[in-house]
Image (spheres, rainbow, N blue to C red):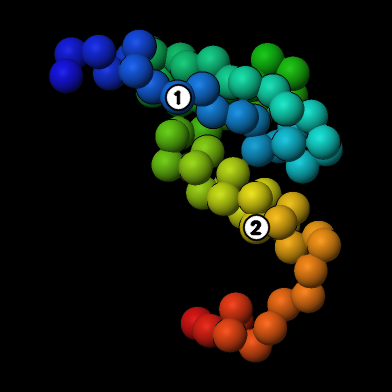
Amino acid sequence: MAQAEKGRLNYRCPSCFLRDLDIDMFFDKDKGEYYCIRCQYTGTEEDVLAKNQLARVRYRAMGKRFTEEEFDL
Ligand SMILES: [Zn+2]
């Protein structure tokens, strides 16, 4: 339970990932944000996860067509 920092996953930089670069981000404990050493991206865990999710959806969608059910809002 007390190993929150150590147990954290490394998050991939969503900004770099969209350029086909797989860069692990570092965590700035003072700011409580993740940051990328390659580009200027910084973001909270929540932000990183949300953007990574978008990237995943985009890449997974590349080889396939969407069906109407997938646009079920
Ligand atoms: Zn980056």
The picture quadrant where one finds residue 66 is bottom right
Q: Residues within 10 Å of mark 1 (few under 14, many from 20)?
A: few
- Kind of residue indicated by mark 2: Val
- Kind of residue indicated by mark 1: Leu
Determine which residue is flagged by label 2.
57
- Residue at point 71% right, 56% down? 60
Circle 1/circle 2 CB separation < 8 Å: no
Q: Nearer the viewer, residue 19 or 1?
A: 1
- Residue at point 65% right, 88% down? 68
Q: Residues within 10 Å of mark 2 (few under 14, many from 20)?
A: few
Asked if 43 appears above or below 26 in the picture, the reply is: below
- Residue at point 75% right, 32% down? 16
Badge 1 or badge 2: first in the primary sequence = 1
Q: Nearer the viewer, residue 52 or 15?
A: 52
- Residue at point 64% right, 30% down? 13
Q: Secondary structure at mark 2?
A: helix
Asked if 23 appears above or below 20 in the picture, the reply is: above
- Is residue 40 shown to the viewer in this render? no
Residue 11 point in image, percent of width and height: 54, 28
> Horizontally, is 46 left or right of 65 in the view?
left
Image quarter in which the N terminus is found: top left
Q: Secondary structure at mark 1?
A: loop
Residue 5 point in image, percent of width and height: 33, 14
Determine which residue is flagged by label 1.
9
- Is residue 48 shown to the viewer in this render? yes
The answer to whether the residue bearing label 2 lies less than 8 angstroms from the nearest atom of ligand 1 is no
Residue extending furthest toward the bottom: 68
Q: Nearer the viewer, residue 5 or 31?
A: 5
> Horizontally, is 49 left or right of 59 in the view?
left
